[in-house]
């Protein structure tokens, strides 16, 4: 039966070879099944009538009932047009035709009432409607006035008369002959549990909704099934990985105990302890760990990484940490070195700028196993970098590394793959993380170390800059230090640099007594370092900078972050920047300065920053604003190719669909029980169809 839906679209009544080839090329519709899965992108509600007085240009297509009062022809030559004046009890409206006037004049009669459907637009000061659909009101069939599907088409299709209406007609033809054949693909228990409508009902109603309620049910059912099968695939992959890949077992806790008893500089937070437990459990399990560690800026990921490394080193293996940039690698190295020294472990930094002589020594000590921990950039991936036994690879900032690079680190070991810990400071909503990284395990540090005062964030307009400066002077007088950050984006680099320099000069004039530092991307790195060091030592009080300070600076005494042109920064970036303050004991502030005129989005971003310090909440808003396209991992997961579900809106459905998939994989991983036969058949057909299953794996 399922072969029926693989019938070439060419054979559907009304299609034929020419249109079939167009549908192939333009919409990717090859067979009956493809057509049925080509869903409308919106619906027109033909049950509603507007009054002429209610119509304005922002409305989409509207439907009215009105009587033709008179005609006039206006303009000359190519601008010639026919205008019909129609009226209802609330007002008059102009209908306009630029073509086919003769035909319209024959069709429309003065004094007759029509049902008129079209898009209102503003012409001069008046609203009119160009080329509307028209039907005599008396013959207008009310039983056809349900929600009309609207399908997107292309220009190439439209010139061949394959428009939305035509596609609707094809759908109707196909559904009439086939809807009973549409196979169910979920099991009865799942259908019952989530009160889903049957699949064939859902598909009929997504194209031709009987009413709004059925449309809602159809949408829910189809979104659910779409997300369910993607999750099922990710989970199946994970099960397969856990089955296939053994991991080295690390269970000697001597070094860890020693560190805890003698050296640990602070009490771990509950969240840190929980995450370390999760990691240790993995490393003792005999399976290869593949874990994502999410934690907001300042949540203390470094020590978690170090404690994981310690376990591995205790077991006689080595650990590596790879960061996407040199600045980040150096920062990690500095953080880890402090801990490593306490334990007498050997640690080294390897980046593009490591001198050849130092490199040679590193390579050698890595091979002999004398070097315990290696921190670095992509330089770690070079073939010449050989470990004696790499037990753990920590990767920072997952999204900047491709999967290929990740797997290159994996294959650094001869026998068993190293355990892998991916760390990210750009939180994404938990449900989404689970869905996107469905094949990784996830740990979250959702708690900041105690004693941190939440950063106060305020929004100020350009016009109030002097007041802001007054505040900065107070803070500096109290002994604090200040960052003032300007945006820098590549396209407008020159302008931005000018903004920065102008800003710097006016700050110099405004703070004549205060020693300043300036750092930007066009400076030599030794000059940058020099300025950063001066600021760090407290010799300068204000650091004027572009976003180069986004990463890599840790100055606990700097407690004020001023962000100029805040409307030009994205949410994730604002949050990262704000994370530079709030590291010391003092109350910290983040001041977002913007112009008075803000786009709606910029307003939302700034309001969000003012409202919350929670990176996960911020990530949620970011997702609503930008959609999932920019999020880490979406490319690999296949979740971007969704036909009906929308990750920024359907996270609830995603959650339940994933839960259902988890339960299924737990109970019946090969879907072989009788009750899961529908699922097994559907997964089989997905695997066969390159488009759906193959592409996303
Ligand atoms: P991130 O998650 O941003 O990498 P870090 O690991 O750099 O955070 O930690 C931020 C700061 O907090 C560091 O100075 C670190 O020493 C400190 N820190 C980490 N964990 C704790 C804790 N449990 N208690 C107190 N301070 C901590
Ligand atoms: Mg860090």
Image (tube, rainbow, N blue to C red):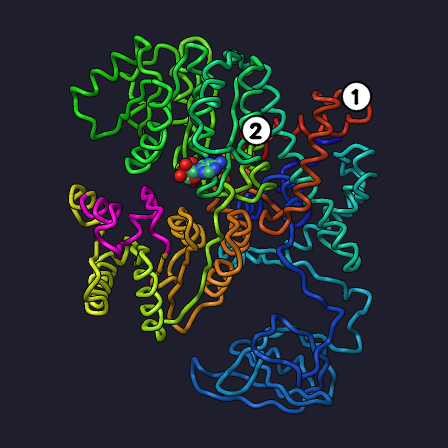
Binning the other alpha carbons within 10 Å of mark 2 as few (below 14), some (14 to 19) or many (20 upward) gives some
Q: Is residue 46 left or right of residue 507?
A: right
Please give the label number shown on residue 691.
none
Image location (x, y in percent) of residue 522 = 19, 50
Quick one: quadrant of the N terminus? top right
Check if residue 596 falls in the magenta segment.
Answer: no
Residue 399, can we see it?
A: no
Gap between marks 2 and 1 measured at Cα: 27 Å
- Work out whether residue 518 or residue 219 is closer to the camera in this orientation and state it: 518
Q: Residue at x 51, y 87 (%)?
A: 125
Image location (x, y in percent) of residue 285 = 58, 15
Q: Nearer the viewer, mark 2 or mark 1?
A: 2
Question: Can you tell which quarter of the image residue 480 is in?
Answer: bottom left
Q: Residue at x 39, y 33 (%)?
A: 401
Secondary-structure class at tag 2: strand
First of labels 2, 1 by sequence position: 2
Ligand 2 quarter of the rendering: top left
Q: Is mark 2 within 8 Å of ligand 1?
A: no
- In this figure, what is the number of numbered marks? 2
What segment is highlighted magenta in the picture?
530-559
- Work out whether residue 78 or residue 374 is closer to the camera in this orientation and state it: 374
- Work out whether residue 229 or residue 166 is closer to the camera in this orientation and state it: 229
Image location (x, y in percent) of residue 653 = 68, 45
Q: Residue at x 74, y 77 (%)?
A: 136
Question: Can you tell which quarter of the image residue 552 is in?
Answer: top left
To which residue does mark 2 refer?
Answer: 441
To which residue does mark 1 refer?
Answer: 673
Secondary-structure class at tag 1: loop
- Work out whether residue 431 or residue 452 is closer to the camera in this orientation and state it: 452
């Amino acid at each position: 039966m399922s072969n029926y839906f693989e019938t070439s679209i060419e054979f559907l009544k009304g299609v034929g070879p020419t249109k079939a080839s167009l549908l192939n090329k333009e919409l990717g519709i090859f067979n009956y099944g493809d057509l049925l899965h080509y869903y409308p992108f919106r619906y027109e509600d033909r049950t509603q009538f507007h009054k002429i007085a209610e119509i304005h240009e922002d409305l989409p297509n509207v439907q009215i009932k009105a009587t033709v009062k008179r005609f006039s022809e206006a303009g000359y030559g190519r601008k010639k047009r026919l205008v019909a004046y129609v009226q209802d009890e609330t007002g008059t409206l102009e209908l306009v035709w630029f073509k086919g006037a003769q035909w319209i004049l024959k069709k429309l009669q003065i004094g007759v009432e029509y049902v008129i459907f079209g898009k209102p637009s503003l012409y001069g000061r008046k609203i009119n409607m160009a080329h509307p659909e028209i039907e005599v009101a008396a013959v207008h069939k009310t039983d056809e006035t349900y929600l009309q599907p609207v399908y997107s088409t292309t220009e190439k299709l439209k010139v061949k008369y394959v428009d939305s209406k035509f596609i609707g007609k094809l759908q109707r033809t196909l559904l009439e002959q086939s809807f009973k054949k549409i196979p169910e693909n979920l099991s009865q228990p799942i259908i019952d549990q989530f009160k889903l409508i049957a699949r064939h009902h859902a598909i009929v109603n997504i194209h031709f909704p009987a009413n709004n309620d059925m449309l809602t049910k159809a949408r829910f059912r189809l979104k659910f099934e779409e997300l369910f099968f993607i999750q099922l695939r990710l989970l199946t992959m994970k099960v397969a990985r856990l089955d296939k890949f053994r991991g080295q077992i690390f269970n000697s806790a001597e070094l860890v105990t020693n560190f805890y008893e003698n050296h640990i500089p602070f009490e771990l937070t509950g969240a840190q302890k929980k995450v370390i437990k999760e990691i240790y459990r993995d490393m003792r399990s005999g399976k290869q760990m593949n874990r994502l560690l999410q934690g907001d800026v300042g949540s203390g990921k470094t020590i978690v990484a170090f404690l994981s490394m310690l376990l591995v080193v205790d077991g006689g293996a080595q650990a590596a940490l790879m960061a996407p940039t040199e600045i980040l690698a150096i920062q990690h190295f500095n953080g880890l070195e402090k801990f490593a020294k306490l334990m007498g472990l050997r640690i080294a930094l390897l980046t593009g700028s490591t001198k050849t002589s130092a490199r040679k020594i590193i390579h050698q000590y890595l091979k002999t196993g004398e070097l315990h921990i290696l921190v670095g950039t992509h330089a770690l991936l070079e073939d010449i970098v050989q470990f004696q036994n790499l037990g753990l690879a920590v990767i920072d900032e997952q999204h900047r590394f491709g999967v290929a690079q990740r797997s290159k680190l994996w294959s650094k070991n001869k026998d068993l793959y190293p355990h892998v810990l991916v760390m990210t400071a750009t939180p994404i909503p938990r449900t989404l993380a689970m869905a996107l990284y469905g094949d990784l395990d996830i740990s979250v540090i959702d708690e900041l170390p105690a004693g941190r005062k939440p950063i106060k964030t305020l929004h100020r307009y350009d016009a109030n800059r002097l007041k802001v400066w007054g505040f900065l002077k107070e803070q500096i007088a109290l002994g604090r230090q200040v960052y003032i950050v300007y945006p820098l984006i590549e396209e407008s680099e020159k302008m931005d640099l000018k903004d920065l320099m102008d800003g710097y000069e006016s700050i110099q004039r405004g703070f004549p007594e205060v020693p300043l530092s300036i750092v930007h991307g066009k400076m030599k790195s030794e000059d940058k370092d020099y300025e950063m060091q001066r600021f760090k030592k407290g010799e300068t009080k204000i650091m004027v900078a572009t976003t180069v300070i986004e990463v890599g600076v840790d100055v606990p005494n700097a407690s004020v972050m001023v962000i100029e042109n805040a409307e030009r920064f994205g949410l994730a970036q604002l949050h990262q920047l704000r994370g530079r303050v709030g590291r010391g004991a003092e109350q910290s502030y983040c001041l977002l300065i913007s112009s008075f005129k803000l786009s709606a989005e910029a307003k939302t971003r700034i309001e969000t920053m003012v409202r919350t310090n929670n990176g996960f909440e911020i990530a949620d808003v970011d997702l609503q604003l930008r959609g999932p396209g920019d999020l880490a991992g979406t490319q690999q997961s296949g979740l971007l190719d969704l036909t009906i579900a929308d990750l920024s809106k359907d996270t609830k459905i995603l959650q339940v669909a994933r839960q259902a998939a988890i339960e299924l994989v737990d109970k019946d991983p090969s879907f072989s029980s009788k009750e899961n036969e529908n699922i097994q058949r559907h997964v089989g057909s997905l695997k066969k169809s390159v488009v759906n299953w193959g592409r996303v794996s």
